[in-house]
Amino acid sequence: MLLGILVVLCFIPTADVTENKILVAQSPLLTVANKTATLVCNYTYNGTGKEFRASLHKGTDSAVEVCSVSWNTTNISSTLNKEFNCQGAHDKDKVIFNLWNMSASQTDIYFCKIEAMYPPPYVNNEKSNGTVIHVQETPIQTQELQSAIPLWIMATVTGVLAFYSMLITAAFINYWQKSKKNMFHQSDYMNMTPRHPPYQKNKGYPSYAPTRDYTAYRSWQP
C-alpha cells in the first residue's frame, strides 16, 4: 500500500513555483531648470515575454497617462498625450522618457509602468515609489531677455532715428535763420512818408504833406 502511494506521487507533475515579475526602479527626485527632463525607468523581468508596453503616468493615483512606448522583437511604436511633449524609447533593460517644454504647473509625481503583453500570462510591475519631477519657475527677467529684440536691431533702429532727428533739426535751424534774415532786411526799410518840419505845423499843411521848396517856383534871373 505504501509503495503504491509513492508510485502515484512520483507521477504527479511538480508545480512551477517561479512567478513572473517585473520590478521597476526610479530616481526619487528630478529637478528641471530648463524645461527639459529625462526620466529613466530601470526594470527587470524574469519571464519570456516578447511584446511589451511601457507608459509614464502623472499624479499620486496615476490618473494621467503622459506617453507610452510599445515594442517587440522587430518593431517599436509610441503614443503621447496632447497636453505633454513626451517621447518614450526602449533600451535593453530600461525605458527612457524625454519631456520638453515643461511648465511649473506640471510639477508632480510620475510613475513608470511596464507591461508584458504577450505571450500570456499578462504581467505588469507593482507600483513603484515614483519620481517627483520639480519644474522650476523661469524668472521673469529671463523670459523678457529671451523675448527681447536683438541688440543689433535696436542699435540700427536707434541710429536711423538719430539720423533723421539730425536732419529735421538742421532743416529747422536753416529755416529759422532764413526767416530771421528776412525779418532783418524788412526792418531796414525807411519810412518814406513825407513829413513837414515841426515849425510849419500852423501853416495849414496836412500832417503828411512835405515842406514845399519855394525856390523851385522862383523865376530864373540872369
Image (spheres, rainbow, N blue to C red):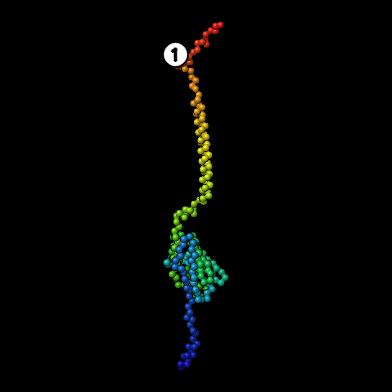
Q: Give the residue displayed 53% in from the left and 39% down from the top.
A: 167
Work out whether residue 83 or residue 128 is closer to the camera in this orientation and state it: 128
Q: Residue at x 50, y 76 (%)?
A: 46
Q: Which residue is mark 1?
A: 200
- Going by the picture, which residue comes out furthest to the top? 222
Residue 45, above or below 134:
below
From the top left corner, tell me how far across and down residue 166 is, in percent. 52, 40
Q: Classify 10 Å Cα crowding around label 1: few (below 14), some (14-19), many (20 and above).
A: few
Q: Residue extending furthest front?
A: 222
Question: Which residue type does callout 1 highlight?
Answer: Gln
Front position in the image: 81 or 174: 174
Q: Examine the rendered structure and indicate whether residue 187 appears above or below residue 219.
A: below
- Residue 116, image x, y percentages: 50, 73
Q: Position of residue 21 (x, y in %)?
A: 48, 75
- The relative height of residue 7 versus residue 72 in the rendered view (above or below) is below
- Which quarter of the rendering shows the C terminus? top right
- Indicate the secondary structure of the residue bearing disc 1: helix
Is residue 43 in view from this perspective?
A: yes
**How many tags in the picture?**
1
Q: Quadrant of residue 64?
A: bottom left
